[in-house]
Amino acid sequence: MTKEELALEVIRRLKEEYPDAGCTLDYDQAWKLLVSVRLAAQCTDARVNVVVEDLYAKYPDIASLAAAPVDDIEAIVRPCGLGRSKARDISGCMKMLMEEYGGKVPNDFQALLKLPGVGRKSANLIMGDVFGEPAIVTDTHCIRLTNRIGLVDNVKEPKKVEMALWKIIPPKEGSDFCHRLVYHGREICTARTKPHCSRCCLNDICHKNGVEE
């Protein structure tokens, strides 16, 4: 089975296993997803979803958040960890949206990368979830699972994993595929315990197939 064939089969099975998989960060506007994905670094999505409720209650739009003192933002987002750097990035990002993009999130990948605190993972998430464009989100679940399954060969650098996956994942499938990897990584192909291979829908085609790392 070629990597392309393996990828298509993995996509098919994960679709059956997680038909409704989507982004686990709560948002109803593009800028809120930008904020949440920055807060999610080294923090659970569940905690981020709780913390942003207080943030948006005080600063309900881009303009008010852009004008907010960094110290005030930090006080609210501190439970997500790395409070100072995250608050500084969020403030800078909102200011840039106001000053350069008319208070709107740009639908251009390279423009997104210029925003403070936005890397390739975040930019891909925005492009895929907000704008419906092809996207590959190489978070920790994606990197771990694609290596275990055999879609990439011992590649751990996020950008290299992304580039490898672009070659074998159909563009229209990329965003949803990555969301399903998150669900599968949390429930079955776990990081902090031995993977539950006996319950895995990919068991018979997985490269690791129960081999301990």
Image (spheres, rainbow, N blue to C red):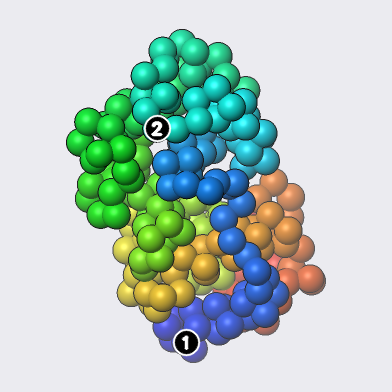
Amino acid marked by disc 2: Ile
Give percent across and percent down for residue 131: 38, 60
Q: Is residue 25 visible?
A: yes
Amino acid marked by disc 1: Glu
Badge 2: how crowded within 10 Å, few (<14), some, or many (20+)?
many
At horizontal 50% and vertical 25% (from top left) the residue drawn is 59
At horizontal 55% and vertical 22% (from top left) the residue drawn is 58
Q: Secondary structure at mark 1?
A: helix
Towards the viewer: 185 or 177: 177
Towards the viewer: 73 or 40: 73
Q: Is residue 152 visible?
A: no
Q: Earlier in the sequence, mark 2 or mark 1?
A: 1
Q: How many marks?
A: 2
Distance in Å between CA atoms under marks 2 and 1: 44 Å
Q: Image height check: is 108 above or below 35?
A: below
Looking at the figure, which quarter contains the C terminus? bottom right
Report the residue marked by disc 2. Answer: 62
Q: Quadrant of residue 101?
A: top left
**Image marks 2 and 1: residues in contact by CB distance under 8 Å:** no
Give percent across and percent down for residue 39: 51, 33
Between circles 2 and 1, the one closer to the viewer is 2
Give percent across and percent down for residue 134: 36, 68
Q: Image height check: is 142 above or below 17?
A: above
Badge 1: how crowded within 10 Å, few (<14), some, or many (20+)?
few
Report the residue marked by disc 1. Answer: 5
